[in-house]
Image (cartoon, helix red, strand yellow):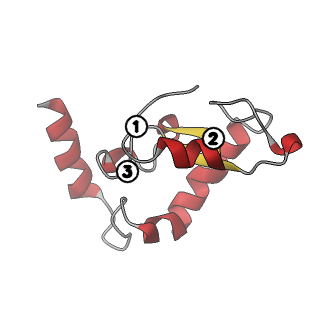
Amino acid sequence: MFDWWKRLKFWWTYPRNLPHPASREFLDTYEWAQVRYQVLLKYRDKPCMACGRGPKQGVWLNVDHIKPRKTHPHLALSISNCQILCSECNKGKGNWDSTDWR
């Protein structure tokens, strides 16, 4: 019940000029860039939270949504729903897994 209410409240307040959080266009928005930057600052000295590799080992780090944007659009701009994963771990996790590696 509570989750349903949060989602309904989210859609009432979601800015109409932004694309749907589950879309690829969402990742190009200024709002997502701000959240991404804040997460990168928060975890700037941390390697991949799943495998422990980092830029020193030559891997790219991504900001990953713990709970997928597709099923939890109301958490798409939440810093507490983000973690740092390398490209391989992020690809392997996909949007069907909600494992919190922090």
Type of the residue with mark 1: Asp
Question: Can you give x and y, in whole percent of width and height, for residue 54 in the image?
Answer: 79, 39
Residue 89 badge: none
Q: Quadrant of residue 1?
A: top left
Type of the residue with mark 3: Arg
Residue 69 badge: 3
N-term-proximal mark, 3 vs 1: 3
Classify mark 3: helix, strand or loop: loop
- Spatial CA span between label 3 and label 1: 11 Å
Is the Cβ of the residue at disc 3 closer than 8 Å to that at disc 1? no
Query: Dot 2, how many residues are within 10 Å of its Cα: few (below 14), some (14-19), or many (20+)?
Result: many
Residue 56 sits above or below residue 18 on the image: above
N-term-proximal mark, 3 vs 2: 3
Query: Dot 3, how many residues are within 10 Å of its Cα: few (below 14), some (14-19), or many (20+)?
Result: many
What residue would you read off at disc 2?
85
Q: Identify the residue shown where x is 83% and y is 45%.
A: 55
Type of the residue with mark 2: Leu
Residue 22 sits above or below residue 55 on the image: below
What residue would you read off at disc 1?
97
Q: Identify the residue shown where x is 36% and y is 70%.
A: 19
- Side of 100 relative to 8 (left or right): right
Question: Can you give x and y, in whole percent of width and height, for residue 42 in the image?
Answer: 69, 37
Residue farthest along the right direction in this orientation: 56
Is the Cβ of the residue at disc 3 closer than 8 Å to that at disc 2? no
- Side of 48 relative to 70 (left or right): right
